[in-house]
Image: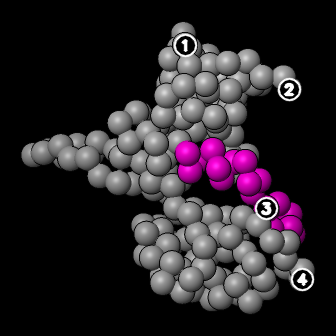
Amino acid sequence: MSDPVIGWYVVYTKPRHEKKVAAFLSASNIVNFLPIARVLRVWKDRKKYIDAPLFPSYLFIYLEDLETYYRVLSLEAVLYYVRTGKEVVKVKEEVIHSIQLITQQTSDIAIEVSDDYFQPGKQLMIKDGILCGLACEVVEVKGQQKILVRVNMLQKNILVAVSSEYFESIAV
């Protein structure tokens, strides 16, 4: 990466090191974002809700300069930046904003991560509720309307069920 463009990028970490890397980067004043979802884990003897990374082994980093790029890459737990060919993939600000809004506001709503392909859905705006103001894509999954956030560089989609009464059409 010879001349980084300021913005969000994705790094791939060693398995189960996402929280450690995020904590270290925050302590080093490097802006990062680790989407977390509350997940019910079931063991033989108990059930427990835990905070698990939405995208295991992936962490979003906001790069401001080339020095930050190399500081992040020099961490032992960071393996590489996500690339397409030889180019480091830049994440759109709207995608980061949508993921942040969904993960911060929906602690009581089930978030589903899927790697299935979805046909393009209707572009709508949420007019009420905890996700008010979110411009989103709505698809039908198993007879239920869900908000879809595409994270193309990871080939993943985030799905959240929201009642259709909160949607409002927007001009595309």
Q: Distance between the residues labelled 4 and 1?
A: 48 Å
Q: Which residue is drawn at 57% across and 32% down?
A: 132
Inter-mark Cα distance, 1 to 2: 20 Å
Q: Which residue is drawn at 29% across and 42% down?
A: 40
Looking at the rendered structure, which numbered label has been put on residue 172?
2
Q: Is residue 35 left or right of residue 41?
A: right
- The residue beneath circle 1 is 165
Give the number of callouts.
Answer: 4
Label 4 vs label 1, nearer the camera = 1
Q: Where is residue 12 in the image (x, y as percent from the top left)?
A: 61, 67
Left or right of 119 in this view: 147: left
The stretch in magenta equals 84-101
Q: Which amino acid does label 4 sit on?
A: Ser
> Mark 3 — residue?
90
Instruction: Name which residue type carries label 1.
Output: Glu
Reading the image, the residue beneath label 4 is 2
58 shown above or below 155: below
The first of marks 4 and 1 along the sequence is 4
